[in-house]
Amino acid sequence: MLTIALAKGRILDATALALASAGYPVPNDLAESRRLILEDDSRDVRYLLAKPVDVPAYVEHGAADLGIVGKDVLHEKQADVHELLDLRFGVCRLVVAGWPNTDVGAVKRVATKYPRFTTDYFRRMGRQIEVIDLQGSVELAPLIGLADCIVDLVETGRTLAENGLTPLAELGTVSARLVANRRSYQLRATEVDAFVEALRQRSGGAAS
Ligand code: PRP
């Protein structure tokens, strides 16, 4: 049985759609369900429902053979996994954002869930900043003066707009990726390849 770790939250609905179109349907109530392991005996797969930031660890350590998770998390966690496909959903921009009049070149404190992206970006600008490492609702930080700006994902732009904030600079775009445990990729090549091919052909994924 192949074990596949899925990221709960933002990309779960799109993940379920991609799996269904690849011939691996998952229950409709996946997002609402409290179950953490779902088995599909007829297709010989089971799914682990994990927090996005934990998916790379499940795959790296072999608790899952495969995982579907955002590139933002993969980059941030630097897990030793094999990245197989860009699934082309869950596309978001990673931006510096803040009050409209903020000078990005002069900020000192930056709040983010992405300390690695943030430090790298400001280092490339030749700036040393203090990173305030938060776990969510990062937009709060500039609103209450905890940070001068944030580095965060923007999908629709609603969260920024509804809080009077605006994108100030773009670091890049991210999307969902299919990753494999390195050992599973070698030892279970036939099963892994069948799954990868199904996703590639039916969901339009591309080698990443
Ligand atoms: C993400 C991101 C932004 C928001 C952007 O947070 O960190 O806060 O979504 O989406 P939008 O542009 O469509 O408004 P998420 O919903 O993953 O939750 P979090 O704040 O708890 O991290």
Image (cartoon, rainbow, N blue to C red):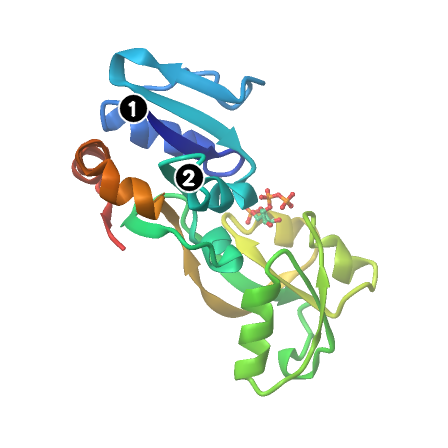
- Residue in the picture at 57% in, 66% down: 116
> How far apart in space, not on screen, are marks 1 and 2 (Cα)?
24 Å
Any atom of ligand 1 within 8 Å of the CB at mark 1? no
* Disc 1 residue type (three-letter): Ala
Q: Given contact means CB atoms under 8 Å apart, are the residues at marks 1 and 2 in contact?
A: no
Rendered residue at 43%/42% (across/down): 59
- Crowding at dot 2, Cα within 10 Å, few <14 / some 14-19 / many 20+, comes out as some
Which residue is painted at 83% across and 59% down in the image?
A: 144
What residue is shown with label 1? 20
Of pointers 1 and 2, the one earlier in the residue sequence: 1
For label 1, count other residues whose C-alpha is less than 10 Å away and answer few (under 14), some (14-19) or many (20+).
some
- For the N terminus, the image quarter is top left
200 shown above or below 107: above
**Depth check: 112 or 153 in front?**
112
Q: Position of residue 4 (x, y in %)?
A: 38, 31
- Seen in the picture, residue 193 relative to 70 is either above or below; the reply is above
Q: How many marks?
A: 2
